[in-house]
Image: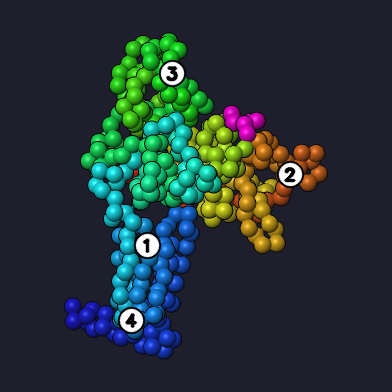
Amino acid sequence: MRRILTMILVALLSLTAVANDFDINVNTVLGQLKARVAPDARVAIWNITVSDSTEIPVVKGTVGNSYQKYLINKELNLYNLTYIDSVRVLEENIPAEKEWALVKLSIATLRCDPKHSGEIATQCVMGTPLRVIEEVGDWLRVQCPDDYIAYVPESSVIFLNEKAFEEWRMSERYIVTVYDDRLVTKPKGDETVSDLVLGDILQFKGKKGKWIELATPDGRTGWVETSSVEQFDKWAQQPLDLNKIEKTARRMMGSSYLWGGTSTKVTDCSGLAKVSYFSNGIILQRDASQQALTGKKIADWHDAQLCDLLFFGNSKTGRVTHVGLYLRDGKYIHCSGQVKINDLNPDAPDYLYSPLSISRINGMVGTKGIKYVRDHDWYFFGSISCH
């Protein structure tokens, strides 16, 4: 024990010496910390500045969660730096009854700013769990299961406290597995309770023949044919099936492009990849440039396999701006203006774009940025994974 304490003391003294030798200050330490824990503003809130107008530097601004603030204090104290802590944690202002939210519409649109005229950031389907970070008028800043942060109208969700959220995760739920459908007021009825799209999650209420009664997150009940849904925990256990992913993508052929679209109604390029993989129970990152940093890298498109992700963009800067899913024989499906198929072979009549990089998702689920729904504790209370 004495030896361990001695080693810790030496390490701390060494850090102090490094700080003195290289003039490490509050700004330097926080800059390095941000690069490690919050390099991407799309998935982490980090608005920190350092004021040196007083004798002691004042660290001020906002972070999204309490763990980020803990890291700030831990890092600065590690270097024995003197500072005034004036950092606010956004989630600490959220009342307990509003810590979590569920999307109650078939599709909710999330924006970059808390206003309807704001740029579309992404979409979430019914039953998607959201962590509430901040209330801004009638809007909520939320984090999605893929870590993406954006604003959603409060009217698109229902709130849950921790206990209610736990109960929802343990409840019997069904997921929509067809391209689209309707929840109707009675079996064989024509009056609509809600439209439904692939990936919507509803709670079980009862069955009658080939019809099943389900409830939306906000308690609206209705009926849908059992062939359109599957028990959620059973669905989540499905094995990787590249043919199913391909089938989902092809089912969207001809549908129109929408920046930020992430559903079977309309989609953008990375949304097509997300929706296709989600049909197989896999969560990808939101944007193409994020997806490009995941998976196993494939050097040449001639070595690509079914549903590998192909990334396109500026060959000079390496900036990724587009993504598609590889099919076979040089063909790939993507959303550019509409969901369509093009060829990677420059000699082909339907050639369009050459990839900057290729990422294989097959065999990489569970690595950074790629996760099974069954292993995500926002969907299930405790893991139901069979691994």
Secondary structure type for disc 2: loop
Q: Count of labels shown?
A: 4
Task: Indicate which disc, 3 or 4, sits on the residue closer to the N terminus.
Answer: 4
Between label 1 and label 2, give the one nearer the viewer.
Answer: 1
| Element class at badge 4 | loop
Give the residue type that dot 4 points to.
Ile
Q: Residue 252 lies in what quarter of the image?
A: top right
Give the residue at mark 1.
62
Earlier residue among tags 1 and 2: 1
Frontmost of labels 2 and 4 is 4
Residue 49 percent across, percent down from the top left = 41, 70
Q: Which residues are magenta?
A: 251-256
**Other-residue count near label 3 (Cα within 10 Å), few / some / many at <14 / 14–19 / ≥20:** few
Q: Main secondary structure of the magenta part?
A: loop
Identify the mark nearer the N-term, 3 or 1. Answer: 1
The residue beneath circle 2 is 352
Q: Find residue 387 and report its image quarter.
A: top left
- Residue that carries the numbered disc 4 in the rendered image: 56
| Residue at mark 2 to residue at mark 3: CA–CA distance | 42 Å
Residue at position x 30%, y 65% in the image: 70
Residue 312 lies, in percent from the top left, at 66, 51
User: Farthest residue in the left direction?
Assistant: 1
Q: Name the N-terminal-most of marks 2 and 4.
A: 4
